[in-house]
Image (spheres, rainbow, N blue to C red):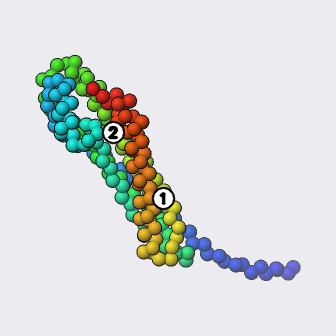
Amino acid sequence: MKKAFFPFLIVFLISVSTSWAEPQITESNTYYEIHGNTLEQLRSEMHHKGGHSFGVAFTDWRVSWMADRVETPQGFVVTNSNTKVIVTYLYPKWVDEAQAPEELRQKWATLMKAIVIHEKGHGAIAIEAARAVDQAVMAVKPNKSAHVLDGYVKIAGERVLPIYRKKEVEYDRVTKYGQTQGATF
């Protein structure tokens, strides 16, 4: 019996492992103090101390990103997106609430619940933006130059953020800055 000789072609495939982790999310609350024994006093305090032209609460967010990369025969490839979002909520804190009439305290509790719901909506948009940045970074094509790849990573994230800033504007328009969610006196 003759043995057939089959030459074996050994092919080495380089497999680049990519990691798709959730963005790192940090949320925190900050407060400014208000005083008053009437709804009008509280409203005036919030509008003067809130520091923002629209509303009495505010959500600020920042997304940052950086890609891990490896060199392959095809060039440098993104292997991981290190995306972070920091969301900071600013709310009024009624410091002399205990001295106010019960009816006013109940109205305040209802108002604050609605304000938090509205601001958390802004936070959800921020987290959605971070996820979109993460996806955009992971979609960056390989490049022969690490420096050029890093530039494309930066551009990929920067293209996403204005979309979500516009979503926030639309969110405020649709909710009338939280009024449709009950954030009104």
- The residue at 72%/78% (across/down) is 8
Q: Which residue is tagged 1? A: 136
Q: Quick check: 128 above or below 157?
A: above
Q: CA distance from mark 1 to mark 2?
A: 26 Å
Q: Residues within 10 Å of mark 1 (few under 14, many from 20)?
A: many
**At x 61% / y 75%, what residue is drawn?**
12
| Residue 70 visible somewhere in the drawing | no
Along the horizontal axis of the image, is 176 left or right of 79? left
Is 147 placed above or below 97 here?
Answer: below
Pick the quarter of the image with the N terminus.
Answer: bottom right
Q: Position of residue 72 (x, y in %)?
A: 52, 75
Q: List x then y, in percent, for residue 131.
A: 44, 52
Q: How many marks?
A: 2
Q: Which residue is mark 2?
A: 119
In x, y percent, where is residue 171? 41, 40
Q: Is residue 29 left or right of residue 4?
A: left
- Residue type beneath disc 1: Ala
